[in-house]
Image (cartoon, rainbow, N blue to C red):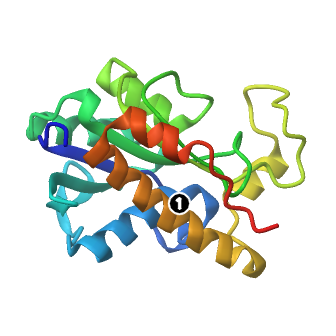
C-alpha cells in the first residue's frame, strides 16, 4: 500500500438540469457513483463546488464536482486543493474524452489538456499539469476519429452535449463501474499499476 495521504477526486461536468446525463458530464456520473458506493455525500458547498470527505478503499479523499461550468473548472479545483493542502500529484480529475472511443477508460499521470477545456482551465489555475486524470472515452459520434483542428465541429459539440442513447446504457454502466475500480486501484496500488491494469481494457460489447 502506498502513502494514504488525502486525495482530491474531481469529476468534471456542467451544472444544471439541461446537462444531466450528457456525455460531457461523465465525470459527474462517476463521482455520484463513488459517493453512493462509499457513503460519501457530496453536498457541502465551498469555492463554487459541491464536495464531501470520506474514504475509498481505506484511503482518505475529497470527492468534488465543480459548479462553475466545464471551461471554468480550474478555480474551484485549485481553491479546494489549496484549502485542504493537497498537492497536485494527489489530485485526480475524471473527464470525458472525444479522442478515446466509447468503451475505453484510460488513466494518465500528467500531461497537457488534449483540447479539453476543463483540463485546460485546471492546468491554468494550478500552474502545472502534473495531476492524475481518468479519461473516459465518448468518441466523436459520426465524425472522423482524427482531429482536423483544435476547434470542435458543430456535430461534435452536439455529440458531446447529447445524452447517451438507450442502446448505450449497458456500456455506460460498465464504464462507470470500471472507472470506480480504476480510481480505487490508483489509490491503493499506485498510478503505474493502475495504468497497466486498466489502460488495456476495451469495454465495448462485441
Q: Residues within 10 Å of mark 1 (few under 14, many from 20)?
A: many
Q: Considering depth in this image, is 121 or 39 the residue closer to the camera? A: 39
Residue 117 falls in image quadrant: top right
> Residue reaching furthest bottom?
166
Q: Residue at x 53, y 47 (%)?
A: 198
Q: Is residue 24 above or below residue 199?
A: below
Q: Is residue 44 left or right of residue 23?
A: left
In this rendering, the answer to whether 44 lies above or below 187 is below
Q: How many marks?
A: 1
Residue 32 sits above or below residue 68 on the image:
below
Q: Quadrant of the N terminus?
A: top left
Q: Nearer the viewer, residue 179 or 120?
A: 179
Query: Which one is in front, 181 or 24?
Result: 181
Is 39 on the left or on the right of 117, as rendered? left
Q: Of all residues shown, which one is farthest toward the top?
A: 127
Q: Which residue is mark 1?
A: 26
179 to the left or right of 50: right
Residue 14 can be seen, yes or no: no
Q: Residue at x 66, y 77 (%)?
A: 170
The picture places residue 160, in percent across and down from the top left corner, at: 69, 54
Q: Quadrant of the C terminus?
A: bottom right
Amino acid at each position: 500500500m502506498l502513502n494514504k495521504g488525502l486525495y482530491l477526486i474531481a469529476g468534471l461536468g456542467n451544472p444544471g438540469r439541461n446537462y444531466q446525463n450528457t456525455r460531457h458530464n461523465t465525470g459527474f456520473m462517476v463521482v455520484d457513483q463513488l459517493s453512493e458506493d462509499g457513503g460519501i455525500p457530496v453536498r457541502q458547498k465551498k469555492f463554487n463546488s459541491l464536495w464531501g470527505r470520506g474514504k475509498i478503499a481505506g484511503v482518505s479523499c475529497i470527492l468534488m464536482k465543480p459548479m462553475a461550468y466545464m471551461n471554468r473548472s480550474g478555480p474551484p479545483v485549485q481553491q479546494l486543493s489549496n484549502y485542504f493542502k493537497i498537492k497536485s500529484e494527489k489530485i485526480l480529475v475524471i473527464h470525458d474524452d472525444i479522442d478515446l472511443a466509447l468503451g475505453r477508460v484510460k488513466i494518465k499521470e500528467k500531461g497537457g489538456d488534449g483540447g479539453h477545456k476543463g483540463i485546460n482551465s485546471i492546468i491554468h489555475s494550478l500552474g502545472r499539469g502534473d495531476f492524475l486524470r481518468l479519461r473516459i472515452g465518448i468518441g466523436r459520434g459520426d465524425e472522423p476519429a482524427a482531429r482536423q483542428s483544435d476547434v470542435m465541429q458543430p456535430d461534435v459539440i452536439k455529440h458531446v452535449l447529447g445524452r447517451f442513447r438507450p442502446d448505450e446504457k449497458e456500456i455506460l454502466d460498465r464504464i462507470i463501474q470500471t472507472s470506480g475500480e480504476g480510481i480505487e486501484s490508483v489509490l491503493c496500488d499506485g498510478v503505474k499499476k493502475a495504468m497497466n491494469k486498466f489502460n488495456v481494457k476495451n469495454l465495448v460489447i462485441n
